[in-house]
Amino acid sequence: MSEIVNDNTKEKVRNRRVHMANERTFLAWIRTGIGIMAFGFVVEKFALFMKQMSFVLGKSTIGESLPPSHGYSAILGIFLVGLGALMGLLAYVRYKKVEKQINEDTWQPSSILDAMLTISVLAVGIFLVVYLIHSI
């Protein structure tokens, strides 16, 4: 009887460690999503700053409107904020799925979120390179 209780205790401790690892992974995904959202916010606000600076430097009368936007910074910023929020949601879904798999001892690796993040970062990187080359 003592061995059965001891084995159950070891199993609970092992599962606790696996659950904590799953939680750390979830929190890492959340931090990444927050970082992407913050970067998107900075990109969007930089576009607004550039519009205001061009107005201040290029216009002398107060009644004139702001000059038209010459870039996609605002669109890119909004996209990045949305991507970060979507990553948070997908991270939660993945966390709950893995938690259930750990409890049932049926864990299967899944790289869908990893692939989505990689493709998104690659697309944003290509867009930024093209945008920067075009703005030279």
Image (spheres, helix red, strand yellow):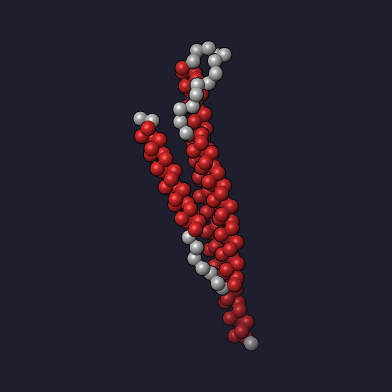
Q: Quadrant of the C terminus?
A: top left
Spot occupied by residue 119 in the image (x, y as percentages of width and height)? 44, 50
Q: Is residue 12 above or below residue 87?
A: below
Q: Residue furthest top?
A: 61
**Residue drawn 57% across the image and 13% down it:** 63
Q: Quadrant of the N terminus?
A: bottom right
Spot occupied by residue 64 in the image (x, y as percentages of width and height)? 54, 15
Spot occupied by residue 69 in the image (x, y as percentages of width and height)? 49, 27
| Closer to the camera in the image, 11 or 124 | 124
Q: How many marks?
A: 0
Whether residue 38 is visible, yes or no, is no
**Residue drawn 55% across the image and 44% down it:** 82
Spot occupied by residue 85 in the image (x, y as percentages of width and height)? 57, 47
Q: Is residue 87 above or below residue 39?
A: below
**Residue drawn 44% across the image and 43% down it:** 124
Q: Is residue 92 above or below residue 42?
A: below
Q: Is residue 55 above or below residue 114?
A: above
Whether residue 133 is visible, yes or no, is yes
